[in-house]
Image: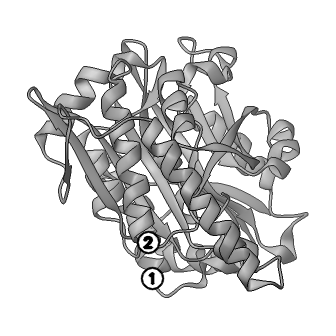
Amino acid sequence: MLKIRCFEEGDKVKCISLLQTIFPKKQEDNFEKFWEWEYLSNLKNTGGDPVILVSELDHKIVGVLAGIKSRINIGDSSFECIWLTDYGTHPDYRMKAGAFKLAHRAMEDFDILLGFGNPNSSIIGKRIGFNYFSVPILANVLSLKNILSSKMKQAWLAKGLDAVWQAFRKISLFISGSKSDKVQIEEISFFDERFDTLWDRVKGDYPVICCRDKDYLQWRYGFVPGYKYKIFGATDSHGLTGYIVLRLEERTRFRTGLIVDCLSGINNIETIRCLAKTALSYFEEESVDIVKCLQTGIPVYDNAFKKLGFIFHRRNINVFIKSKSDKVTDSFLSDRRNWFLSIGDSDLDFYCFY
């Protein structure tokens, strides 16, 4: 008989084994430490209360639904939410493992559920009862050499076209403006109290935004095993005005740089522009072919990135939403215009959806 229940301490090894069976890309050596970081050491999961449901058939775990407990700021209020991250059933039990029952149980237990997914997952999401909207991926091509070499036999032609592209980029960056004298950029090694001050100052600028206080940022980017981030902060005479989080991705076809997160005040155009230019400079030094990020949905960010050469990529990411709260409606959360989003808001950073 199928049983849906909450995760228990003795389930860890079985859940990890099941996820590695469902998702072969999770076979890396550090996955157990990563899984413990993602769920068991999550700041919001202290007290042994991780957001994990399992489906059990004849005393065997055949399905799992796991999520990251977080908070979103909506207007002047803060709400607990769950980002659904690991969800699947054993291939041998697809018709018996209760995938839909897992999802419906999650919707009973939590008021606001969120999740990122690829475009193919929209049918499943709608069947479960989620609304969704699509978010474009932005891309900035720093080098054409490797990209063209994979498509052209004439290496000299690829090299020549890349030289023309580099000249065009330099002219575009020059037109976009010189370095600001007011904004200073520094590398960040630890998220201190300045980030709480920044978060309290700017969170009201955005209708819907996920929590970005110092404790969350340190857990998300400072403590995650197996991933290294480059973090830069922007300061002026008044203190910290913004930050940007970057990562190199080696698993993609071309050397890819990810802008995982970026935050400043909605009226601080100069900081946003300086942080974006810092990202491009860093990725150029690392010989990156292409830089990618999510379109934030906030005009001041999107315009600044567009002026620096970011264009729409051919892929979109879906954001799935389900709200039972009488204070936050599905229709409000399903409006793309209300959201500020980044790759780092969930686990999109780790699985090459981009």
Is 149 located above or below residue 296 in the figure?
Answer: below
What number is the disc on residue 154?
Answer: none
What number is the disc on residue 34?
Answer: 2
Tell me the element at label 1.
Answer: loop
Are the two marked residues, 2 and 1, in contact with CB atoms closer than 8 angstroms? yes
Is 213 located above or below residue 97 in the figure?
Answer: above
| Residue at the bottom extreme of this rendering | 29
The residue depicted at 54 percent of the width and 28 percent of the height is: 303
Indicate the amino acid at tag 2. Answer: Phe
Tell me the element at label 2.
Answer: helix
The image's colouring method is one colour
The residue depicted at 53 percent of the width and 58 percent of the height is: 349
How packed mark 1 is, by other alpha carbons closer than 10 Å (few <14, some 14-19, many 20 or more), is few
Residue closest to the eye, 188 or 100? 188
Quadrant location of the N terminus? bottom right
Rendering coords of residue 46 (x, y %): 30, 52
The residue depicted at 17 percent of the width and 56 percent of the height is: 190
Number of residue marks: 2
Q: Is there any visible trace of residue 43 in the rendered image?
A: yes
Residue closest to the eye, 309 or 222? 309
Disc 1 designates what residue? 30
